[in-house]
Image (cartoon, rainbow, N blue to C red):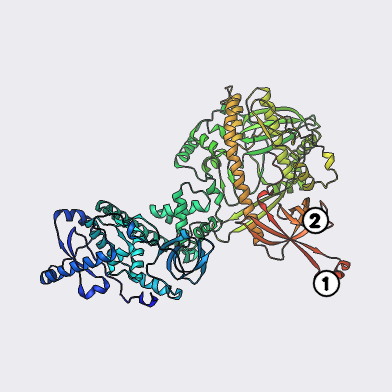
Amino acid sequence: MNTCSIFRSSPPLPALGCRLHQFRALRNPSHAKLGFRISVFQSNQHNNLLFGRVGLQSYYVQSLVESVAEELEALRERKRVRASSKVGIASTGELLENKLEKRALREGLLLEFKKDSERVLLAVAQRPDGKKNWMVSDQNGFTTSIKPQQVTFIVPGAENFDEAEISDFLQKAQNNLDPSLLECAWIELLEKNKRVTVEELAEIIFGSAEPLECYCAHLLLSKDEVYFTLLEGKSSFCVYGPRPAVQVEELMHKKLAKDAAEKEFQEFVQLLKSAKTLPSHDKLHKSSWENEEKIRDRIKSLEAYAIDACEIDDQKKTAGMILMAMGLAKTSASALKLLIDIGYFPVHVNLDLLKFNIRTDHSDKIVSAAESFLSKASDPDELGRIDLTHLKVYAIDVDEADELDDALSATRLMDGRIKVWIHVADPASLVQPGSIVDREAMKRGTSVFLPTATYPMFPEKLAMEGMSMKQGEICRAVTVSVVLHADGSIAEYEVDNSIIKPTYMLTYESASELLYMNLEEEAELKILSQAATLRFQWRCRQGAIDTATLETRIKVTNPDHPDPSITLYVEDQADPAMRLVSEMMILCGEAIATYGSFHNIPLPFRGQPQANIDVSAFSHLPEGPVRSAAIVKTMRAAEMDFRKPIRHGTLGIPGYVQFTSPIRRYMDLLAHYQIKAFLRGDSPPYSSGQLEGMASIVNMNVRLVKKVCNSSLRYWILEYLRRQPKEAKFRGLILRFIKDRIAAILLMEIGMQASAEVSVGLHVGDVVTVEVEEAHPRDDFLTLREELVLSDDDQSAHIASRVCIVVANCCLRNLDIMGLVSIE
């Protein structure tokens, strides 16, 4: 057949609302070429029940029928005979297997094939490709090899087809598609209980079984979800059957619902596209996306997809559909970018808070219970408190600290020995074990300190107003007093409920300045520093390892802004004020462990088995971060016991209990519950077994929070580096060599470890100058390059420049930022 004879100039076919059971199907002579069918209906109650519920309009042409009834009846009879003989509709409903001829692929055939899970294309068969496959040229002009099972339809009669005319053929087919035509055919076939092939359906609907009409019929059937079902066959020799009326009605309702949902989905997609185009200050607030349930559910699906936390398959499917509709890749990164672009997330959103479900707010129930604690006037330990308000009290912490839970005092006794007091906030005087506020604190395990915000373990008002120490105000405390021997060991110790009146609230910087100034009026601060020195020297003699290094802190102002302000602090843990505070905290932990052991109080004792570390083996390394880094790599993991103290090898003390941060660490609060019960003469609220069970839960949450905090700090360090000028240079201290010339370096101005390839001839302890080549906070990626200025002799050997650039990639996930080891 010549391909030119395939195409017909038929306009798009009109929709017909054929919806009654008894009718006379008549072909309008003036529209015979288009297959335009007009039906004459006889309505009855059964018909109204069967078809009226679908709600499709019926058209009545009574006047026409009355005028030409006899002529059209005769014409109808002739057409029926012609159609039956042409397409072979079986009068008895038997299978049509004997009337179907399997069409084998051959050159020039027009076929439809499945390109992938989402695309179906038209193509012309060109030549065999191996034993079974075929090379085809598709509608887009591409030639590809397909398998037989990819073929979905072979267009009957379309032989020697010109591939250049595929697009025209496809356009004409699309123009002739009218799903309502299937309804008329369904009524006729259902009435006769007939099965039908694609060619037969084309004859019924269009009055012709030419290639174009057959393909139109195939498209209608392939897109149909209501009227017909595939009974048997494949490719171009499929047999379809009309569905029962009840099933059609049910499917129609489902289709209407599906169409409505699709319309709603497209409106949502348009909403996203519109939101993306808005300037930052006009974008919808996050709460606006959560007002309407269906919009909220779709947004939550995108959110879950962005953090790889889809709980159900529907969320993943919904998110994938949205991304595809927006023309985006189905990746978590695409979902995140979309949520940022529409204003749902800020640019620097902390995904880990969402991914790990970190609690950032307290419920109204918890807040109400906390406020009721504040309203209580009584102090359960009032009679047993000692008055220490006469002491000069120093509270030393970082400048942005919200929860001040420890302070220090000191004096020199008449015999020359030093006595120190470590005052610790007393939240256990407000919160009782097992209370609703206590249970919530246990679930959290710790306060969360991020560069962008602080999320306290207790409700903020309770922590700030009822528990935290305040300068110049009477505060409840648990005070551990210790008298030191001349060598720094503990001579005497006491634990008491107390009241204090903090004199100074100092930052580490201001405390160090006061120490350097050596003012007579601040003699107590100098005594504290002397006590810290004695303690450090004594611990070193007991095998303690000095792990002091650089520690980074970052403060981010207005983090929801696309370009927030970042302030970076690098603190040397060997700084006099920091050393003073850390030594006093260690001293308090040792005293509490000794106190608990002596009185058989179950406590969360912490220890670290001695790893038989010979510190002298590292004496060839420079003191400070380099030596600390080498020693830390040989240390064993910390352990816990709840019955008796265990030696803490790194700290060089016989036992240790975290006790100085009960507002921000739940394990410290547990120690307070136990100690305070003993001070009152009561039994401890928890046995050693109970403490062990609680600790396993708390420590799991604490590890998760630490991971989130480290990740957030790392993100903002990289964002800080990303903003630095290209010419900015940093000093890198070589800590060790990882492999060949790849070295672990400590960026001195940043306080962060990274890795970089360094030049030949450098050694551990040397300092190199590096520049930031690339920094990508969201990808957790940093690229550094070393800058090495060559000597005059070296320059003569190089034609190019005076600078040798070596680039190295640094993935920060496995690198230490917060410091080499935490004392507590």
Of helix, strand and loop, which one carries label 1?
Answer: loop
Give the quadrant of residue 472.
top right
Quarter assignment of residue 102: bottom left
Q: Position of residue 547 (x, y in %)?
A: 75, 42
Residue 279 seen by the camera: yes
Q: Is residue 371 left or right of residue 73?
A: right
Labelled pair 1, 2 in contact (Cβ < 8 Å): no
Question: The disc labelled 2 sits on which kind of residue?
Answer: Val
Image disc number at residue 521: none
Residue 701: x %, y % from top left: 57, 39
Q: Label 1, on which residue? A: 799
Total numbered circles? 2
* Dot 2 crowding, Cα within 10 Å, few <14, some 14–19, many 20+: some
Look at the image and tell me in which quarter the C terminus lies. Answer: top right
The residue at 60%/49% (across/down) is: 450
In percent of width and height, residue 522 lies at 73, 42
Depicted 264 relative to depicted 626: above or below: below
Residue in front for this viewpoint, 237 or 19? 237
**Residue furthest right in the image:** 793
Q: CA distance from mark 1 to mark 2?
A: 27 Å
Query: Callout 1, which amino acid?
Result: Ile
First reached walking from the N terminus: tag 1 or tag 2: 2
Residue 315 percent coordinates (x, y): 45, 51
Residue 476 visible, this orientation: no
Of circles 1 and 2, which is in front?
A: 1
Q: Residue at x 19, y 58 (%)?
A: 21
Q: Is residue 201 left or right of residue 341?
A: left
- The relative height of residue 407 versus residue 319 in the rendered view (above or below) is above
Residue labelled with disc 2: 767
